[in-house]
Amino acid sequence: MATLGPEGTSQRRHAVHLLGLGRQVGANGQLGGDLLERTALLIAHLVNQAREDGAGRIGLVGTEAIRNASDGAQLGQRIRERTRLQLRILSGEAEARLSYLGGTAFRVPKGQPATVVDVGGGSTEVVHGLGSRPVNGNSLKLGSDRILMAVQADDPPTARQRVDAEMRISMQLEAAPEAAQSGVIIATGGTAANLPVLLGLWRPFPDSKDVLREEDSREPWLSLSRDDVDRALHLTAAHSSAEVAMRTGLSPSRARLMAGGVLILRGLLERYGAEELVVTERGIRDGILLRLAATVARPA
C-alpha cells in the first residue's frame, strides 16, 4: 500500500508472509486444500485492512507459484468470493515487465540503459530496457528455493553443493537475454532487499503477523560492489540459516533462502560482466501501483 506522487511513492506499507507456495507447487503441482484456504483467508484479511486504511484502488496478482499450480484458478475463485476482487495471474513476461517498471521508475533517466533482475523463490525475471521502458526480457525457472531444492542443499550448503548450484545457475543464465547496451544492473525482490541486511547496512523488514507495516524511511536504492556480494556469499556459506538469522535479524526461513539467492545474484554479475549491483525494495509491487494509477488516469 502506498501513495503515488510526481517524485515517487510515499507512505509505503506492506506485509511479508512466507507461506511456501513455490515449494508446495514444485513438489506436488498444486497448492492443495489447506494452503488454498490459508492463502485466500490471508489475502482477504489484508484486503480488508487496506480498505479500512483508505486504499483507493487495490490490485491482486499471482506470480510464478500460482501460475504453475494446477489449482491456481481455484485460489482466484476463493479470493473473489471473499473480496469481490479479481486475482490476475501474470504471465512470466508480464511479471518481468512490471518488475522492470517498478525497479527503474524515478531512478533511471529516460533513454539510459538498465537491466532489472528479480530473484524470487521459484523464478528469476531478467529484463533490459531504456529508462523505465522495458525492451526485452524473460522469466527463468531459477529461484532461491528452487536451486536449493535442486542440489538437495544442506544447511549451510556444502562446498560440493555450492559448486553444483553455481553450475546449474550458469547454465540457466545462458537463457537470460543479451543486453543491447551495458547499463546499471538493478536487483529487486526479496533476495535483493535482504542482501544489505546480510551486510549490516539495512535493518530487516519483519515477517508480518496480521498487519500492514510501515517501511523504514531510507534511500530506496543502494549500490553494492561485487566484493560486497562475495562477503554475503561467504556468510551464507559459512553459517547455518539459524546462525545467519541470529546475526542479522532475518527470520530463519528468509536466511535459508538467501543461501540460494545470493548465488544467483553472483551468477548474474558474472553473466553480464558487472562489478556493481544496485539493490532496491522497489519492484513488481511498484510496477503494479504505477499500472493501477495509469488506469485511473486514463480518460474514459
Image (spheres, grey):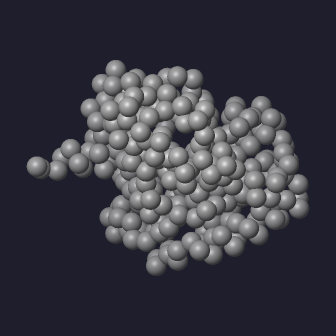
47, 251: nearer the viewer: 47
Q: Is residue 69 above or below residue 60?
A: below
Question: Where is residue 256, by image quadrant?
Answer: top right
Could you tell me if residue 201 is visible in this image?
A: no
- In the figure, is residue 215 to the left or right of 196? left
- In the figure, is residue 59 to the left or right of 64? left
Total numbered labels placed on residues in the image: 0
Residue 154: percent from left, percent from top: 85, 49
Residue 11: percent from left, percent from top: 38, 31
Residue at left offset 49%, top offset 28%? 41
Q: Is residue 227 above or below residue 60?
A: below
Residue at left offset 44%, top offset 63%? 93
Point out the residue furthest to the left here: 300
Residue at left offset 50%, top offset 67%? 138
Residue 235: percent from left, percent from top: 79, 47
Residue at left offset 59%, top offset 57%? 123
Residue 63: percent from left, percent from top: 49, 50
- Quarter of the image for the N terminus: give it: top left
Could you tell me if residue 254 is visible in this image?
A: yes
- In the figure, is residue 213 to the left or right of 263? left
- In the figure, is residue 189 to the left or right of 6? right
Q: Is residue 27 above or below residue 82?
A: below
124, 41: nearer the viewer: 41
